[in-house]
Amino acid sequence: MKTKEYDLLPMIFKRIPRNAWIAFLAGIISGIVTHLYMLTNKYPNWDDCAAFNSGGTSTTMGRWLVTPVHNFFAEYSAPYVHGMFCIILLAVSAALVVNILSIRSATASAFTGILMVVFPSVASFMTYMFMAANTGVALLLVVLAVYFSRKYRFGWLMGAVLIFFAMGIYQAFFAFAASLMLMSMIVDSLFGIGSFSDLSGTETSKFQAHKEKHTSPAGRYIIIGVRHLLALGLGVLSYLILVKLSGWELEDYRGSDKMGELPLSQIPIVVARAYHRILQYFVTRPLPFMSSLYHIANIAVILLLIVVYLICVRKCKGHMLLNILSVAILPLALGLFYVMAYTVEDASTVMTYSYVLVYVMLLALIEQLSSVAGDKMTRILAAAVAIVMTVVSLCSYKIDNESYFRMHIAYERVYAYYDRLVVRLEEAGYTLGERVVVAGSIPEDLKGIDFDGMDYYRMVSVDGVTDEKGLMTEGVRTNFLRIYLGVTSGGNTVTKDETEAIKASESFKALDIYPGANCVGKIDDIWVIKVGD
């Protein structure tokens, strides 16, 4: 009797639909091409110097799951481990997103994969290389939360668990989850698709088929909405309860110490801020890293999104009241981190990753419109969307790589500067293992290094991108010298209190500022090189 051969890979390939593969592969290829500069080099910022062999701050920022996830990938901030896994995880997330939003065409699927991996926020993920893979895990968890709460009758339970764990890694991505939930419901209500379908778009149970047949469109919309609300609400609530009961002393960092403490008087302010910031991002006040072409493309995206949505409303039969309400609160969902951390006035580039869904929403709507209306106007709009998405993708590629280039220049200059300091130390008699500190505030007109702006305000507006000064603060110097020049203090690092005592001493005041002839001295058995007062 012939037995059926069990072959896992063909089963997986058969199960995953074509559009998901396209989104995944487009994400992988574009991710490697775009971020190769950062993957094959080691360009740190201030936090990466401090967290070279750790996941960074954890419970002090409410990120209790950071350390175990970080150590699962690599203990050290290795670019081709953490960075590559970040790309893979983002590409997997893109494959799920095209299913959630019922994107089937090869073009829209490919653009989804590309945009989710090259969006400027991803450059910020990479600059904090020690947490890049963690960021990818957190995003995948919230996307899976949406997928499960959408697909299964009680999937909201799994969704709540996944959001709970995701917030233990990076809290701001719950805004991505809320936005994706709303967008999927908007698409469903317009076109009546996907409410109870599995990954391949087919029904998975008689119960689901019965629900699809006997539940009205508005009823299905409400059912899915309730599932999403339960997943999101329980996930966030569970996380806040854990933080409250844990007794962790949270740092005052981008509102992390104020999560869940929104005063009623602040609600109108933070809601208005969420709407205003997304309008600024895409239309009225582009960030410094955005070129004029990128700004024009973003305005075109918003205009196309409005036009395509209005045509969809006119041509499609859905529950318009529920749909319009969802569209009205979508900007709030995209900026929900302003509500969660109400003291944040300007979110970081990492936090605004949810904004990438604006492009994906346009792709989902134009695809569905093309499937129900094949007229000339629709074809023109589809072509316009493809052109604009190409421009956005190329502009994002440019922003990412200019950011990496700026970090490269900063690293090379700072390395050369510290190398010259070490030479002066050795000339004065320093030997490896003795305690050493680089003390003093570096003046703006620092001798020995050229602070050429290199579009300073444009490039460092990508969160995490560092210039020379970012690698020369007193908190970074010791780590940079230890990691990249091998200058250690025999495991006995000079403390902040010791440094302050040295700077207050008469011996320190008598030293010249580097590169003066008398800029190196030994104070209380600690080698000191003075770079400022």
Image (tube, rainbow, N blue to C red):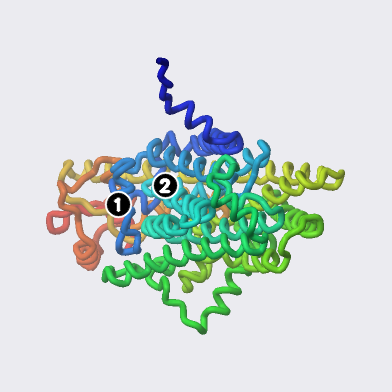
Residue neighbourhood size for the residue with mark 2, other residues' Cα within 10 Å, grouped as few (<14), some (14–19), many (≥20):
many
- The C terminus lies in quadrant: bottom left
Whether residue 117 is visible to the viewer of this picture, yes or no, is no
Above or below — where is 211 with respect to 60?
above
Give the label on residue 149, or none: none
Residue linked to disc 2: 132
Above or below — where is 173 with respect to 79?
below
Spot occupied by residue 12 in the image (x, y as percentages of width and height): 48, 32
Looking at this view, is 175 or 480 the one in front?
A: 175
Which amino acid, by three-letter code, is at mark 1? Thr
Identity of the residue furthest to the top in this view: 1
Identity of the residue furthest to the right in this view: 376
Whether residue 268 is visible to the viewer of this picture, yes or no, is yes
Residue linked to disc 1: 67
Q: What residue is drawn where x is 53% and y is 66%?
A: 336
Q: Quadrant of residue 171?
A: bottom left
Spot occupied by residue 96 in the image (x, y as percentages of width and height): 54, 45
- Sequence order check: which comes first, mark 2 or mark 1? 1
Which amino acid, by three-letter code, is at mark 2? Ala
**SS label for mark 1:** helix
Q: Is residue 124 left or right of residue 288?
A: left
Identity of the residue furthest to the front in this view: 1
Looking at this view, is 415 or 216 the one in front?
A: 216
